[in-house]
Image (cartoon, helix red, strand yellow):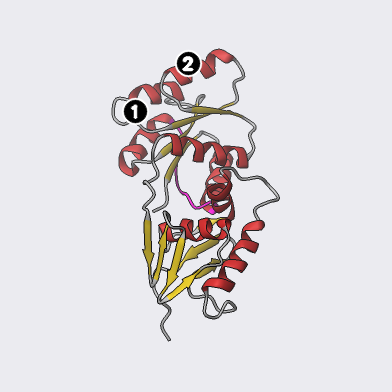
Amino acid sequence: MSKTILVVDDKESLRTMVKSYLTQEGFRVVTAANGRDALFVAREEKPDLILLDLMMPEMGGYEFMRTHSREADTPTIILTAKLEESDKVLGLELGADDYVTKPFSMRELTARIRAVLRRAGKTPPEAEVLRARDVVLDRNSRTVQVGSRLLTNLTPSEFDLLAALMSVPGRVYSRADLLELLQGVSFEGYERTIDVHVRNLRTKLEPDPANPTYIETVYGVGYRFAAEKHRD
């Protein structure tokens, strides 16, 4: 299931930009224009992480954090144009997990979101044996069996890529997601290496690599492990 991110900022253009980018990265995004509205949205949506501007009308970021912290312990990243060290320190003292100073890179923001979610323990523990369709993957023995066929020629990257996709069948992973899962961090310009790994993995896994039924391409987004077999 996609993580829900609440974006709180009084600038509609920024909310739209961040929502569009994070949605492409596989997140579910909800928004609010000020702290007061954000309290209602947070109560309804129960986000996994909050991106919070500090300077907003009606209720600013500091007041929101004071109020929301009495209701929930949600990881928070501050979005601020302020450069003073005291503003950043106060935000962290009020419970923020990280901060990003405007203007910021969307790739940097996405990397920080993923890092905070990892530290907050928002990702489930890895299962030792994964089963999806007729594929069984054993992390301990590093083996993959497809029906009665044992795959013995997977590279470490191909094995880890398959494990990532099988961990949540049906979930769409962006190339950046997969690269970070494989390498621990995503670098611009290297995401297309995932396409090579997928192509090689399909050659070994799929009965007909030209018409894959296990690893599906979601055009414009990334890849997923098909939860169900295709029917004629």
Residue at figure coordinates x 58%, y 60% from the top left: 155
Q: Nearer the viewer, residue 99 or 10?
A: 99
Density class for disc 1 (Cα within 10 Å; few <14, some 14-19, many ≥20) is some
> Considering the numbered disc 2 on the image, is that residue within a helix, a strand or a loop?
helix
**Image quadrant assignment for residue 65:** top left
Disc 1 marks which amino acid?
His
Horizontal side of 193 relative to 99 (left or right) equals right
Q: Is residue 28 one of those drawn in magenta?
A: yes
Judge whether residue 60 can be spotted in this image: no
Horizontal side of 230 relative to 112 (left or right) equals left
Horizontal side of 8 relative to 14 (left or right) equals left
**Image quadrant assignment for residue 105:** top right
The residue lying furthest to the right in this view is 189
Q: If the image is split into quadrants, where does the C terminus sit?
A: bottom left
The residue lying furthest to the bottom in this view is 232
Residue at figure coordinates x 38%, y 60% from the top left: 130
Q: Nearer the viewer, mark 1 or mark 2?
A: 2
Q: Position of residue 109 (x, y in %)?
A: 57, 38
In magenta, the rendered stretch is: 24-34
Q: Nearer the viewer, residue 10 or 50?
A: 50
Above or below, 140 against 204 in this view is above
Checking the image for residue 90, the label placed there is 2
Judge whether residue 136 can be spotted in this image: yes
- How many numbered discs sit on the rendered protein? 2
Q: Position of residue 110 (x, y in %)?
A: 55, 41
Horizontal side of 54 relative to 176 (left or right) equals left
Q: Which residue is mark 1?
A: 68
> Considering the numbered disc 1 on the image, is that residue within a helix, a strand or a loop?
helix
Above or below, 210 against 192 in this view is below
